[in-house]
Amino acid sequence: MSSMSANLVALHTVARREIVRIVRIWTQTLIPPAITMTLYFVIFGKLIGSRIGSIAGGFSYMQYLVPGLVMMSIINNSYMNISSSFFGAKFQRSVEEMLVAPMADWVILLGYVIGAVARGLVVGALVLLIALFFTSLHVAHPLITLASVVLGATIFALAGFVNAIYAKKFDDIALVPTFVLAPLTYLGGVFYSIKMLSEPWQGISRINPILYMVNALRFGVLGISDVPVGMAFVVMLVFVIALSILALQLLRRGVGLRS
């Protein structure tokens, strides 16, 4: 068997294991985020949104909220899936078997990323389905919508992988969602247009990568955005490339993996 064939078999094995894991514990991986997002729709969309009325572009607040909540669910679940799964492999020392196996580093990384992106997209689809019970939507740009959710999921899958490499205990996994993801999400235009902010908050928001992910998806779904959609995709691609290089370098050096 050639080296490429062996790597493809290994990639299929790692990715399949990750997806089977998601399906096996679906009550933990799929149901809780769906329930959480339903509460967001009820509280923010129905109760608060009914008092706000229409927002940017003439859309109702509920419609404006949907892309942000879909992207928030995607990035949170992509991050949590890969960080918990890869750190679990470290904790059980099964990751050492992959490191000594005849598979390339990119195979390990891509296999885990595929699993994380798959969970993110499934949860995102569930959230979008739930949203249709509260409002009507017509996707303005399907290809942009698909590209934005895949890139957003990939970015936070890679970030979760890097965090899992550096993490020394399970508490280290929970620090990032609490102290990094939550503040970035609330300052990322999920619940409002950043044009409503005064300085310096508007300027601070513009250095937040989640702002570009949310607005890329909002443009794909509604056709409106607070930032140029081309710039949003450039920012996302830069993060994908930079985090991929970092993750591969850490794997090659065995940082946090080889005792």
Image (cartoon, grey):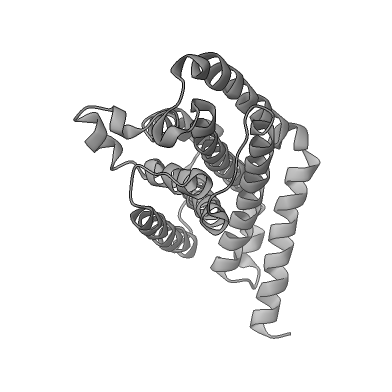
Q: Is residue 259 visible?
A: no
Expressed as whole percent of the image width and height from the top left, the position of residue 17 reads 74, 54
Between 173 and 131, the residue placed more toward the observer is 131
Quadrant assignment, res 47? top right
Quadrant assignment, res 146? bottom right
Expressed as whole percent of the image width and height from the top left, the position of residue 166 reads 46, 46
Q: Is residue 237 visible?
A: yes
For the point 64% across and 73% down, the residue is: 102
For the point 50% across and 28% down, the residue is: 60
Expressed as whole percent of the image width and height from the top left, the position of residue 1 reads 74, 85
Q: Is residue 59 above or below residue 206?
A: above
Q: Kindly give the residue lying farthest to the bottom in the view shown.
A: 2
Quadrant assignment, res 207? top left
For the point 61% across and 28% down, the residue is: 37
Horizontal side of 210 relative to 48 (left or right) equals left
Q: How many tags in the picture?
A: 0
